[in-house]
C-alpha cells in the first residue's frame, strides 16, 4: 500500500489501467489523516526495493534491463493517459522534486549528476541522454509541450536499440582483447620453450667430451 495526497484523482486514473505489465490496482482505503492505494501483493518486491532498498543485492539492475522495464510500463500506459492526466499522475506520485533536480543538471549538460552510480559506467551515454531529455518533456507545465505516450515509448525503444548495439560492440572489443591476450601468452610460451631447448643444447655441448 502507498500513501497518496489526493486519492480520488489517483484512483480515477489507476482504475482505468489493466495491463499484464503492471501490478493490479485493487482500490483504496481512507482513514483519519491517511489515504492508501491498495495493489496486489508483489511477492518479488517492488522495483524501488530492487534498485535502492533491502532487495538490492550485489550489483544493481543494469541499464538495458531498466530500459526494458520502462518499455513494458510505457506499453501499458500507451493509450491510457492524455498528456494532462499523465502529468497529474506524475505529480500524484510526488516525483516533481526529482525531475526539477534532474532538469537543472541536464540544462547544465551534466547528465552524470543524475545517473545512478551503481551502473558503473556500463551504459551508452547517447541512450541515457535520449531517455533523460524525454523524461523532462513529460513534466513540462503545459500540455501541448508534453509528448504522447506513443512518443515516449518510441524514444525508449530507440534507446534500447542504441544500448544493445553498444553492448555488442563492447563485447566484440572485449573478445578481441581476450584473443590477443591469448596469442601473446602463446607466443611467450613458445619463446620460453625455444629458450629452454637452446639452453639444454648448450649445456649438453659443454658437458660432452671434446674429440681428440
Image (cartoon, rainbow, N blue to C red):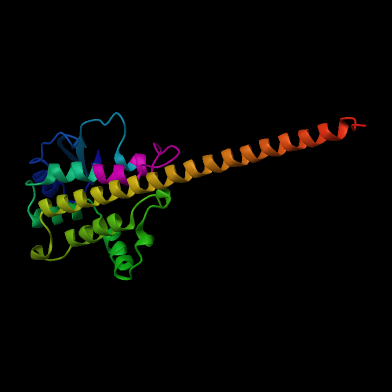
Which residue: 10% across, 40% down? 17
Above or below, 36 relative to 117: above
* Residue 127 location, quadrant: bottom left
Q: In this view, which residue lies farthest toward the bottom? A: 108
In the displayed structure, does residue 16 sit left or right of residue 196?
A: left
Residue closer to the observer: 51 or 154: 154
Q: Position of residue 99 (x, y in %)?
A: 27, 60
Above or below, 27 relative to 108: above
Q: Position of residue 164 (x, y in %)?
A: 29, 46
Which residue: 35% across, 40% down? 49
Which residue: 38% across, 48% down? 170
Q: Position of residue 46 (x, y in %)?
A: 30, 38
Residue closer to the observer: 27 or 128: 128
Image quarter (top left, top right, bottom left or bottom right) of the N terminus: top left
In the displayed structure, does residue 196 sit left or right of residue 29?
A: right
Which residue: 38% across, 45% down? 172
Q: In this view, which residue lies farthest toward the right? A: 212
Which span of residues is magenta-colored? 49-68
Is 51 magenta? The answer is: yes
Q: Position of residue 77 (x, y in %)?
A: 12, 45
Above or below, 94 relative to 174: below
In the displayed structure, does residue 127 sit left or right of residue 188?
A: left
Q: In this view, which residue lies farthest toward the front? A: 212
Image quarter (top left, top right, bottom left or bottom right) of the C terminus: top right
Is 95 magenta? The answer is: no
Number of marks in the image?
0
Amino acid at each position: 500500500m502507498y500513501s497518496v495526497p489526493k486519492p480520488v484523482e489517483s484512483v480515477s486514473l489507476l482504475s482505468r489501467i489493466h495491463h499484464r505489465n503492471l501490478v493490479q490496482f485493487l482500490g483504496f482505503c481512507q482513514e483519519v489523516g491517511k489515504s492508501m492505494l491498495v495493489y496486489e501483493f508483489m511477492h518479488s518486491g517492488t522495483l524501488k526495493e530492487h534498485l535502492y532498498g533491502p532487495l538490492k543485492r550485489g550489483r544493481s539492475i543494469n541499464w538495458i534491463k531498466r530500459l526494458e522495464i520502462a518499455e513494458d510500463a510505457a506499453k501499458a500506459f500507451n493509450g491510457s493517459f492524455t498528456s494532462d492526466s499523465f502529468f497529474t499522475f506524475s505529480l500524484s506520485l510526488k516525483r516533481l522534486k526529482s525531475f526539477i533536480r534532474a532538469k537543472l543538471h541536464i540544462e547544465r549538460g551534466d547528465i552524470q549528476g543524475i545517473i545512478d552510480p551503481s551502473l558503473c559506467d556500463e551504459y551508452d551515454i547517447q541512450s541515457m541522454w535520449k531517455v533523460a531529455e524525454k523524461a523532462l518533456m513529460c513534466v513540462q507545465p503545459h500540455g501541448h509541450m508534453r509528448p504522447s505516450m506513443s512518443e515516449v515509448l518510441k524514444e525508449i525503444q530507440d534507446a534500447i536499440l542504441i544500448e544493445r548495439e553498444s553492448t555488442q560492440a563492447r563485447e566484440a572489443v572485449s573478445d578481441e582483447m581476450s584473443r590477443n591476450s591469448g596469442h601473446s601468452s602463446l607466443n611467450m610460451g613458445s619463446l620460453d620453450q625455444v629458450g629452454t631447448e637452446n639452453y639444454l643444447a648448450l649445456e649438453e655441448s659443454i658437458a660432452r667430451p671434446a674429440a681428440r
